[in-house]
Amino acid sequence: MQNPHSPLDPALLQGVGHRLVDVLTRYLQSAQSGGLPVLPRREPADLAQEWNLPFQADPTPDVQEEFFRLVDAVLHNSNHLHHPGYIGHQIAVPLPLASCLEMVGSLLNNGMAVYEMGQLQTIMEKRVVELLREKVGFGSDSSGILTHGGSLGNLTALLAARQAQSETDAWNSGQDRPLSILVSASGHYSLARAVRIMGWGADGAWPVETTREGALDAKDLYRALSAAQASRRKVVGIVANCCSTATGVFDPLESIADFCEAHSLWLHVDGAHGASLAFSSKHRGKLKGIERAHSVVWDLHKMMGLPALSTAVLFRDKRHSYETFSQDASYLFEGERGETAHFNLGERTIECTKRGMGTTAYGMLTLLGTSWFGEHVDTLLERAQDLAALMDEAPDFELACPPEANIVCFRYFPVGDLSSEDLDQLQRELRQKVIETGEFYIVETELNGSHWLRATVMNPLTRTRDLRRLLQVVRACAYGR
Ligand SMILES: *Cc1c(COP(=O)(O)O)cnc(C)c1O
């Protein structure tokens, strides 16, 4: 029998675990019914002041009570994604069973770098990646891995692009010429970071102008390519958005893929947000051409309902998934060290230790069935259409563009003469006021030099009538200024 005071005592898990499930269930019911403010906003200085007690050398006298006091405080001081008024950042409203699978994974803490540290979890990750490869239309020669987030995923894919396209063995010998990749001006900032991490500098992400809505136009690519080359940069490829973060518009992948083929460029598709449309028979047409990409990044913690972080990096040619971090990669996929090496996922990721995220994904895909994920995407996109339709009909709202995904950028546009500065300022104030009502959480973005409000429908429990209410709340906040 273990010492009852040991923090490793299984009885502690049992005692706390049962009660924790009850606490979280009540929390979930309350959040889903809108019984809490979506974001109970607190000033960081106030919270820091409230939580400033020094750490003690001795344990707290009543571990269980203190545990629930902490849980309660965290629950009350967080953003409530399960609230129907949560239409903010593009992060999944997690499925409760997925969170339970995460708990199993975190108790096991198998590190995933080598097969022996996560045997079945490795197989499950491979099965998930296999399904995702199939969904984007990659063949049996493709491969991929799961990694901690789209930002790391983009860096992993760009490292592969560099290794495949640069004139030197860049991984081992560095580069003897400045490299660039053409990136949409509306590309995610993780791309600008990735090129700097690789030492390409700011011009490593060579910007390509977009349409007002934020999409690439293939006819602008040649100009950007020539300009980069005139600056003595070796251009290794193009990153296409699928979809763009700010407005959710999809780049024309077919014509970009044609351009890449004609100029021997790597095509990376940043599908962190939008690749999940591959599950939807209604919307997968928006990804047409993705099957011609060399690499694709796909966040499962966005439209797939899974907890963060969980990202797939997919390569159409599996060699790229093995060669990126190794000069002599051949043994990993065909060679001498035998089959097991092939299953040591850590040889193909930036991470050494990583969470068993494939297990959660595998579990949910199996438990819910793959159709659920397509229907989930359809629901989110349909609600965004509903919101856009409501705003289109309203004389005092303006849309930045018709939504192609579940992202809607809009402004409140009252009658009267407002300068563009006043209009921008109005949106900033409205966002704060809307959040203070506790009914909605929305975000904001800059587009073409002006300020817009932005809603991303991530919660399938957000109903059309909740969205109708958003218009009323924005108006009330404008009048009450
Ligand atoms: C969210 C997003 C990213 C970053 O992914 P993280 O998982 O947050 O690191 C990259 N690109 C696009 C297009 C995104 O929407």
Image (spheres, rainbow, N blue to C red):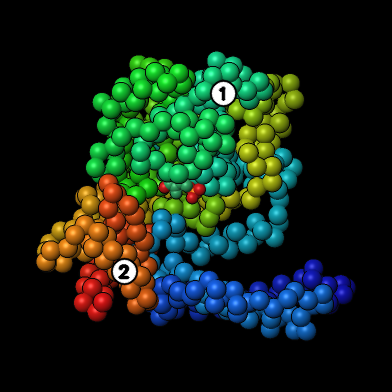
Query: Where is residue 324, by image quadrant?
Result: top right
Query: Where is residue 214, by image quadrant?
Result: top left
Residue 469 seen in the current view: no
Residue 29 against residue 320 in the figure, above or below: below
Q: Tell whether circle 1 marks a residue whose Cβ is less than 8 angstroms from ligand 1.
A: no
Residue 406, percent across and down?
A: 31, 54
Residue ID at (28%, 27%): 220
Q: Which residue is mark 1?
A: 163
Residue ID at (25%, 59%): 421
In the figure, is residue 120 to the left or right of 62? left
Residue 332 seen in the current view: yes
- Disc assigned to residue 429: 2
Report the number of discs.
2
Q: Considering the numbered disc 1 on the image, is that residue within a helix, a strand or a loop? A: helix
Residue 151, percent across and down?
A: 51, 44
Q: What type is the residue that disc 1 sits on?
A: Gln
